Image (cartoon, rainbow, N blue to C red):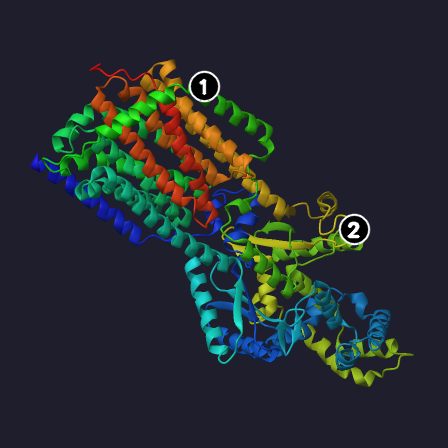
Amino acid sequence: MASRRSIVLIVWLAALAACAAIIARTNFVADLSAFLPSKPNATQRVLVDQLRDGVVARLILVGIEGGDAASRHRISRDMAAQLRKSPAFAAVQNGEAAALEHDRAFFFNNRYLLSPAVTPEHFTVAGLHQSIGESLDWLTSPAGMMIKSLLPRDPTGETLQFIEAFQQQGGPRTAGGVWVSKDDSRALILLQTQAAGSDTNAQAQAIATINAAFSKAHISSTAHLLMTGPGVFSVAAKESIQHEAERVATLSALAVIALLMLIYRSFVLLGLGLLPVLSGAVAGIAAVSLGFGEVHGLTLGFGATLIGEAVDYAVYLFVQSPDASVAGAQRWQPSFWRTVRLGVATSVCGFAAMLISGFPGLAQLGLYSISGLIAAVLVTRFLLPELMPKGLRLRDVSHIGATLIALIDRLARFRWAFGVIAVAAFAVLLVQHAKIWNHSLSALSPVTAQQQSLDASLRADLGAPDVRYMLTLNASDQEHALQAAEQLEPTLRKLVDAGVIAGFDSPTHFLPSIATQRARQAALPDSDTLRSRLKQALVGMPIRAERLTGFITDVEAARKRPLLQRSDLNGSSSALALDSLLTHKADGWSVLIPLRAPSSGKNAYVINADKVSASIAAGASPNWHLIDLTGQTAALYSSYLSEAIQSSALGLAAVIAVIALSLRSLRRVTRVLLPLAGAVLAVMAGLVATGHSLNMLHLVGLLLIVAVGSNYALFFDQSFAGNDTAQQQRIAVSLVLANLTTVAGFGILATSSVPILSALGIVVGPGAFLALLFSAMLAPAHVPTDA
């Protein structure tokens, strides 16, 4: 026996050490990427890429409030200067003239390669006469002073086209030389991180750098800092989930320990009883790390729930054994191990269906549950009996057991109540069937309402449009991607003229294709030709050709200028805009063209997608796909939810099959399944009746009700009626104690401030209690063998 004990102990310690080593190298994440499909279709891929690695996911919006305006403006300048030196940021923009000088110089120096007006007709005598006349008309506008300074070098108004386009797109107000909100109560900074938004560690470092820059810049000021953006949300969510997981795990452990000590009255038994919990949690996290390469914060938080279930196995062993010793454990195994094993098998079947999910978050929870339960039950079966000291006895619980037996007798008289509850619950779900499930992805979002409000406020201050609709296309290389965007532009301009869309953004506004640049260069006349045409075009105009010498020089330089490349935009805000619209991937290039919705009429801010799609289909660009991000997000989550429900149904079918094969009696199978079905229906109806719509985590909770409750129902069916009175009392005490630990663990989880964690608690806590209550109600008559 000593050698067997040593072998078991060595194997357990080695496994524990291996799991600990894996966990030490595990990457924990907390963004929504785990709740995005692992194999998205072409449309879903755009949404997935934007949420994980898109430029939008790399943006951090900063607001500086408090103090006086001059202090806020100074802090903005000082922070921006510091942050531009940090390698953590690809772009830092706060509206400073010096920072925008690169943009102005870029557009002005390359205006003839960038302007769509540059055609051979534009530089004919008639074309020059018309464009110069339009520029002269601008002199009487509010922008007249600027036009006057530009006129000698840009009489055809190429620069004006860019200015007009940017004014239509809107933007933040400027005061004190920096961006500010409309009322100048907040200074604004827009940052783009080098790291992807899904890299929470890098995002946390970037946020720390921003905080450090603010601390250095706001000395002797009462200003305070605001930050928002996808990366900020991810970091906050990760910290919140980790904090809540630690809090819930600590409180759950204390509650469980207190309950166990009421019965055990032994620190030895308490310590042994917690070993399955520790082993299950460690094994679950290690398994997920190996299977997925990372562990989501939700899975980490889910570890706290294992306390309430994994401890049940040790409770069954200690309380149901005639004495808490090796001999007692050995006598317990033949009688009750089969029941525990069947309960574990049903739990594994219930969660196994989650493993095939195309959504990593759901599959992670399934793998964690299965690995944790198997590890916990193996430790209970093989390790605990070897560690139980000789002569150790559990306190006498016969008086508690006798009370519980009497209560079970009374419950049997109220079996009719189970039918009433089940029918009422079914009726509630039938009437409210349209409100049962929450089809919004926001149901899984850890972002608080306050964070969402701040984000909307800062975005409004920065003049960022609410981009819901976008066109997307994939191409083999950058040149073909840009040419496709250029071919689409005439169709989009017609839609703007028709009022179907309010406007659009295109990467070609910042970087035309090589073919287009060459065509524009070819449209530029040489110096002698331009000088001759200019003299004819200026006849009758209040401007002399001698004043336009700089214009002729610039056109000649543009004819010989090297064609624009992406690297020419480095250091400008245009680089950020281009990178958000044109992205390079392993399989090619992707173009995104956001569409701005019209803001008037009863369908304000909504685009008629059918008209857009029909216009594109009628044009020469059939490969473009119109994506409604709001609708696609809803469709994505709906498909996620539907798949999860189908997977759960398969899991439940497997549970029924396992129980049926084991019990081989329709009556017994029905008696085991009815309490579980009743508990699930009652919890669902209770949530719906109180205004809750069920989401993915509620569904996982319903599976847990079946996993936990199956143990209660099976013990009542297999091990209760045929035992002597003393053993029945021990079984009753073990089931109630196991239930109390489960309810305590999940009840504390229900108090979590993180919605995705509290959702589990409010389902499993009451569900586990009802499963035990209904199992006792429907249990067979417990005629003891010594009667």
Q: Is residue 206 visible?
A: yes
Q: Amino acid at mark 2?
A: Gly
* Disc 1, SS: helix
Q: Which mark identifies residue 477?
A: none
Q: Compared to 191, does 97 lie above or below?
A: below
Count the numbered circles shown.
Answer: 2
Quadrant of residue 205 within the rendered picture:
bottom left
* Percent of width and height locating residue 218: 50, 77
| Quadrant of the drawing holding the C terminus | top left
> Of 206 and 545, which appears nearest the observer?
206
Q: Residue furthest left?
A: 2
Residue at 20 percent across and 15 percent down: it is 786
Q: Rate crowding at label 1 as few (under 14), some (14 to 19) or many (20 or more) other CA atoms within 10 Å.
A: few
| Label 2 CA crowd tier, 10 Å (few <14, some 14–19, many 20+) | few
Q: Quadrant of the N terminus?
A: top left
Asked if one can make out residue 341 in the rendered structure from this viewpoint, the answer is: no
Residue 601: mark in rendering = 2
Nearer the camera: disc 1 or disc 2 = 1
* x, y percent for residue 601: 78, 51
Spot occupied by residue 175 in the image (x, y as percentages of width and height): 65, 76
Q: Is 435 situated left or right of 282 in this image?
A: right
* Marks 1 and 2, the one that precedes in the sequence: 1
Q: CA distance from mark 1 to mark 2?
A: 59 Å
Residue topped by disc 1: 416
428 horizontally vs 679: left or right: right
Using the image, determine if residue 579 lies above or below residue 78.
above
Circle 2: element type:
loop
Give the camera-side residue of 233 and 761.
761
Residue type at mark 1 is: Trp
